[in-house]
Amino acid sequence: MSALRIRRSRTATAALAAMLLSAASPIALGAKPPATPVPPKKVVLVEAQGSEALVDPFISRFLSEVSDRSDIAIVDARLSGAHMSELKLSPPTEEAKAFKAAWPADLYLSVNLPDCTTKGSQNTVQGFNDPMTGARTYETIRNVWTECPATATLIDAKDGKVVSSATVTGQRKENPEDPDTASDPTSAAEQEGAEKAAKKLFGARKK
């Protein structure tokens, strides 16, 4: 009789332990199962408005920055001649339907690059005393600022509504008299603007 009671006690203990383990499982506690990874969205670049000198450095840097920040590969459809304004119309035009059939996507992208502006500044700083004359010398420092505005817009491919938009300004500061800073200020400013736009639309770089 004593052995039978021991066996029953052990069986009950094992059953209770199994119940406790089952109750503590993530499903029993109402925890959500692991989410299925979301596939990368397909983005098509419809147009980039602006002069070639502005568009080329911006788009090149923008595409590179996007690839560093997401798994999205942007397809360049600028040669199609389509315009973002056509894709926003409701109901869609026949031209818009044809474009969407030829260039299917989740999102459509457009970039607008107005002309850059340049402004200069000049500061005079105090130098050293001339050892021969005792006169104090002065140095004039000249800087040139180049600012290039840019707007990148994403719309939903189905309804044409704006999903996200980023308006940024790329800047480049140079001393025209310093050969170490000599470069193409417009290109440099456009590239900085592209980096800012990519960050606003697609977040931080992947680690």
Image (cartoon, grey):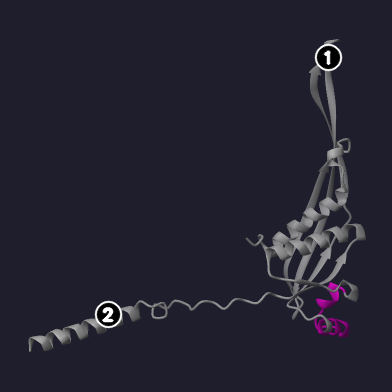
Q: Quadrant of the C terminus?
A: bottom right
Q: Dominant secondary structure of the magenta stretch?
A: helix
Three-letter amino acid code of the residue under disc 1: Asp
Three-letter amino acid code of the residue under disc 2: Ala
Which residue is located at x 77 percent, y 77 percent? 160
Extreme residue in the top direction: 133
Disc 1/disc 2 C-alpha distance (Å): 92 Å
Which residue is located at x 84 percent, y 19 percent? 137
The label on residue 56 is none
Residue 195: percent from left, percent from top: 75, 57
Q: In which quarter of the image is residue 109?
A: bottom right
**Residue at mark 2:** 17
Which residue is located at x 76 percent, y 62 percent? 64
Residue 200: percent from left, percent from top: 70, 60
Q: In which quarter of the image is the N terminus?
A: bottom left
Extreme residue in the left direction: 1
Residue 63: percent from left, percent from top: 78, 64
Q: Is residue 172 left or right of residue 28?
A: right
